[in-house]
């Protein structure tokens, strides 16, 4: 009798868990990966150089300041159901065993500042080679369009374009290397 009861409970539990898993979207944990990269930089006590502009004006930046910048740029929480529903996932295997690209595109109704996130992973590895993102921030009368690329274990590059009244008023490029 116990075997029958146990088998029945196992079957019901398996059926319910399978049903729940098929309805849940699982996206790559971008924010957790960024946090892990930051922890690695911090634990190795790596110097972070901030290079701004084309003239390569550079200065060291504190790990705390860099962490604030990096987490601010990649502020997307795919564990939140509303955020998951705001993005559509596309997976592309280039077929030559060099890259798998997982892209998240914000849908038209999305209020997320991140509009596109592309995770590039070498097949057989769990950690990305790079993460590319596009985000749009609106402050007062200025629209800031940013293109961001994080190269794993190496650097973060941010290209920003500032617009007012649909006119480009300034461009800036910043790179953080460690």
Image: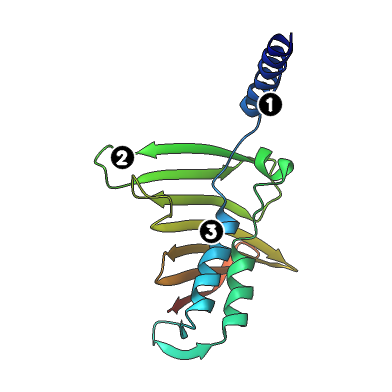
Label of residue 33 in the image: 3
Q: Position of residue 170 (x, y in %)?
A: 54, 75
Q: Position of residue 153 (x, y in %)?
A: 41, 69
Quadrant where the N terminus sits is top right
Q: CA distance from mark 1 to mark 3?
A: 25 Å
Image point (62%, 67%), residue name: 71
Q: Give the mark nearer the N terminus: 2 vs 3.
A: 3
Image point (34%, 49%), residue name: 122
Image point (43%, 90%), residue name: 57
Secondary structure under the numbered disc 2 in the rendered image: loop
Asked which quadrant contains residue 178, the reply is bottom left
Q: CA distance from mark 2 to mark 3?
A: 23 Å
Whether tag 2 and tag 3 are in contact, CB under 8 A, the answer is no
Q: Nearer the viewer, residue 176 or 24?
A: 24
Q: Give the mark nearer the N terminus: 2 vs 1.
A: 1
Secondary structure under the numbered disc 3 in the rendered image: helix
Label of residue 94 in the image: 2
Q: In this rendering, would 3 be left or right of 47?
A: right
Mark 1, residue position: 20
Instruction: Specify few, some or many for label 2: CA neighbours under 10 Å numbering under 14, 14-19, or 20 or more.
Output: few
Instruction: Specify few, some or many for label 3: CA neighbours under 10 Å numbering under 14, 14-19, or 20 or more.
Output: some
Image point (57%, 51%), residue name: 29
Secondary structure under the numbered disc 1 in the rendered image: helix
Label of residue 176 in the image: none
Picture layout, residue 177 above or below residue 62: above
Picture layout, residue 165 above or below residue 10: below
Q: Give the mark nearer the N terminus: 1 vs 3.
A: 1
Residue 177 in view, yes or no = yes
Q: Nearer the viewer, residue 88 or 53?
A: 88
The mark lying in front, picked from 2 and 1, is 1
């Amino acid at each position: 009798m116990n075997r029958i009861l146990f088998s029945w409970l196992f079957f019901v539990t398996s059926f319910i868990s399978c049903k729940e898993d098929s309805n849940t979207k699982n996206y790559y944990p971008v924010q957790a990966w960024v946090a892990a990269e930051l922890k690695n930089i911090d634990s190795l006590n790596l110097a972070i150089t901030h290079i701004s502009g084309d003239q390569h004006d550079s200065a060291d930046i504190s790990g705390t300041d860099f962490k604030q910048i990096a987490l601010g740029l990649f502020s997307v929480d795919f564990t939140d159901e509303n955020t998951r529903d705001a993005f559509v996932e596309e997976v592309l295997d280039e077929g030559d065993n060099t890259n798998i690209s997982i892209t998240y595109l914000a849908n038209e109704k999305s209020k997320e500042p991140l509009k596109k996130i592309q995770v590039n992973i070498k097949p057989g590895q769990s950690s990305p080679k790079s993460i590319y993102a596009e985000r749009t921030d609106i402050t007062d009368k200025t629209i800031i369009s940013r293109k961001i690329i994080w190269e794993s274990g190496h650097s973060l590059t941010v290209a920003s374009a500032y617009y007012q009244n649909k006119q480009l008023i300034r461009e800036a490029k910043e790179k953080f290397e460690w």
